[in-house]
Amino acid sequence: MTDSTDHLLDPLLDRLRAAVGDAHVLTDPADVAAFVVDWTGVHEGQALAVVRPGSTAEVADVVAACHATRTPVVPQGGNTGLVGGGVPDASGTQVVLSLGRMRRVRDVDPVAGTITVDAGVVLADVQAAAAHAGRLFPMSLGSEGSCTIGGNLATNAGGTAVLRYGMTRELALGLEVVLPDGRVWDGLRGLRKDNTGYDLTQLFVGSEGTLGVITGAVLRLFPETPRHATAWVAVPSVAAAVALLGIAQQHAGAHLATFEIANRQALDLVLAHLPGASDPLVAPSDWYVLVELAGAATDRGLDDALEAILGEAVEADLASDAAVAGSPAQRDALWALREGISEAQKVEGATLKHDVTLPIASLAAWAEAMGPVLECVLPGVRPVTYGHVGDGNLHYNVSAPVGGDDDLRAAAPALSAAIYDSVAAADGSISAEHGLGRTKAAAGAAYKSDVEVDLMRALKRALDPHGLMNPGVLLPE
Amino acid sequence: MTDSTDHLLDPLLDRLRAAVGDAHVLTDPADVAAFVVDWTGVHEGQALAVVRPGSTAEVADVVAACHATRTPVVPQGGNTGLVGGGVPDASGTQVVLSLGRMRRVRDVDPVAGTITVDAGVVLADVQAAAAHAGRLFPMSLGSEGSCTIGGNLATNAGGTAVLRYGMTRELALGLEVVLPDGRVWDGLRGLRKDNTGYDLTQLFVGSEGTLGVITGAVLRLFPETPRHATAWVAVPSVAAAVALLGIAQQHAGAHLATFEIANRQALDLVLAHLPGASDPLVAPSDWYVLVELAGAATDRGLDDALEAILGEAVEADLASDAAVAGSPAQRDALWALREGISEAQKVEGATLKHDVTLPIASLAAWAEAMGPVLECVLPGVRPVTYGHVGDGNLHYNVSAPVGGDDDLRAAAPALSAAIYDSVAAADGSISAEHGLGRTKAAAGAAYKSDVEVDLMRALKRALDPHGLMNPGVLLPE
């Protein structure tokens, strides 16, 4: 920040301090540092200030002050996003609005099956509050200990429970949103059925902070599923995993809760970098599936169903071996293998992340064909593939050749283009659950029709005519 | 139509005829009649013409022609809506765009669990195409033999399967929409996960033809549920029904597919007017519940679960008697009692329809309190109450006092105001599943905050700046 802008901006900083208190307007570079770089380390910006309001009214004050001075606002939750959607650009003109102080669970209604929360409540705390009332909030992600529900809503987060319960948008019944001009929209209705006009909640979910700031939400709760039957299954190929999915759906129906895939590269990284991790199977396999059935206390048939699934899979040569969890600790250990991949890959070195959906029928052929293509672009590149195969969603991440971090960085545009072109040709999506953020805003627009981009820009202009909310995120400027 | 407007409008009619063929532009009053009055008979308008395009390209041509001449367009599906959202106003200046000729099932993909259809496919035909491929399209309504999937999507229809599968919006994966200026948005993607920008599909679903014309859709399919366990249960009160719902959820979990309520008045009308209907129970009861569990061929425990539910209900004085369907024919007979109510009430005479949601915890007290209030407004009035109690949704319809149709019409505004005020005070919704249409556009706005109405108007202006799409529907002019 230069002296001249300092002078010009004093009135805004004064107003922000009046709104939230001096202690919650951060401008010292040491205080600001953690809020301006994202989890991947790829996006590092500068902030005019980081403001930490403690209530919806304070958020409204902050946004109104920014609106009056035409100052851009970057809403931020737990700052665990993977596409740079929650950090400021390099201009130093943007205010980061951190929701982290808004951590109140406002209400839990087990009869209606709803929970009402502040946007800054950490996902694990939402899960815990639901469990305390004897209900399940099913959303589950690797970052659940630090991501916030407001961020989950703004990005329409996915995770490992989508197969059964859907994306975040399917869990959202109503929202409270501070609009770009500082007005508050109170849409905190917990009704399953409310057909009275455009669905504003669904418009704000997944809008990545570009249409307003989500400050509160009413979310759906479900009956608890304390019974689990869990297995780590060695499968020969993605095609075998997809076939196994069909068998699992047939035997387990609505009890099928998890169906995750990982390749051997992914498991190797976890075994190398996750303390205490061990391979549950003796012989190595190219691919693995984590399958879990979940049910109520009265659902006593889960183990039998899992056994039937695995038996049929082995008989059809779709699985070579499987480790079935015999205790909660063993279940946790199997889950740790899956949940540890992202962190282990970060420890290993440079990674190029992709988060793609393919139509399930094309998934195996696509994954089969992609490896050789990437090997042509960058010899020695290591596809670390894992994800939610039940949803057609692969985290098709690419680790550098051993010792070749710089080579990966140089080849990144060509690698991503090869992947995205191929996904688009197969009618897939270039962002299954991470959103577009800054990383993919341009690509998102490039792979869409002009009509679709025009529609999105029209919505953006309608709700944020001055372009103040998270500019450069979701839509390219 | 006067001679003078005839003269002025000839160029438009010529262009419409060129677009869809002379035979599909109806202007003769006899041909037009069925398209300008709604199912309830409450809304009767006039049309400049009724146009029946046979393809998306023809719809685009028609809409572009109307856009060029600033002619309002009223999209219409099966014309089974209950709030006048699909018929023109009295001005005679609006073109009715009927999708009824677009009846092609474009694709069924049982592996991906998707079906792609033209907007004009009748709901029952969507169900049949899914069943032909061994899959379930769960949406089910009384009008399924004549309503179209495009109308279901435009109005975000509900029905008897919402409890388990959600409203229409939860079944929609992607749409094809002709925009108000005649451009086509192709959003026909069948992906469960696609986080690349604002969810345009969810914006168009439930927009009641005010933002564009839905011409095609990709919808979700589910595993078939050929096994059913069905009972018609006599319960003493709405409170008992809600308590029984809790028991049913606990025992049946995800197998609970239907939980509908009806009062004795509703049953009496069906017994009086539905040929062949008979009371399955000996002693009369004030209230009834239709409960159904559904499962796969391998789910052999449904009958036991139903027996356990009913046993616990009788023991807790939540049910006095029950008829369990012992054959498909008996099941059909129980369903006919529920599905016949709307038609029977129409035969009986004047009806004032309300379609409200209450938070489930308040439902019983609300229903208890409402009867005496209405009796004060119009002595002898007969609340014919039924609906989807599992969703908190009651069709709180009011039949005229015997012989008092005119009295009901005179008292209608006061009766509806009493109901809506009470619903709003209890944080409910004045339209659970029927939408706002013309009937409730003004009420919808009146019970919303100014901020919410402003947001909706901003969206309408952004997508339809000339206000040509279904003006007067959803938002008051």
Image: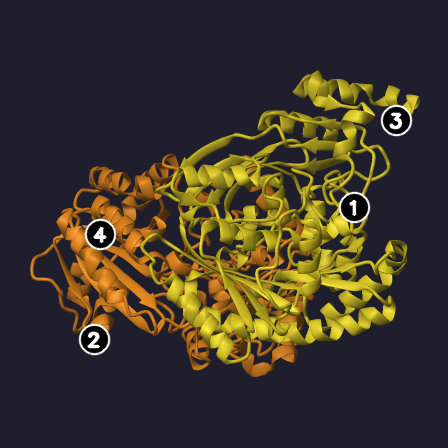
Chain colours: A orange, B yellow
Tell whether label 2 touches label 3 (CB within 8 Å). no
The chain ID associated with circle 1 is B
Of mark 2 and mark 4, the one earlier in the sequence is: 2
Residue A472 visible in this rendered orientation of the protein: no
Q: Residue type at mark 4? A: Ala
Mark 3 sits on what residue?
B1
Residue pointed to by mark 1: B472
Find residue A147 and report its horizontal and vertical position in percent: 42, 69
**Mark closer to the observer (4, 1):** 1
Asked if badges 3 and 2 are on one and the same chain, I answer no
**Local crowd size for mark 3, using a 10 Å CA cut-off: few (<14), some (14–19), many (≥20):** some
Where is residue A381 shown, x and y percent of the image? 20, 47
Which residue: 77% across, 28% down?
A: B32
State the residue position of label 4: A400
Q: Are marks 2 and 4 in contact (CB under 8 Å)?
A: no
Check the residue under mark 3 and report the chain it is in: B
Disc 2 target residue: A327
Badge 1 amino acid: Gly
For marks 3 and 4, give the one nearer the viewer.
3
Is B195 positioned to the left or the right of A420 in the image? Answer: right
What amino acid is at disc 2?
A: Ser
Q: CA distance from mark 4 to mark 1?
A: 59 Å
| Image position of A220 with respect to A198: above or below | below
Mark nearest the camera among 3 and 1 is: 3
Number of numbered tags placed on the structure image = 4
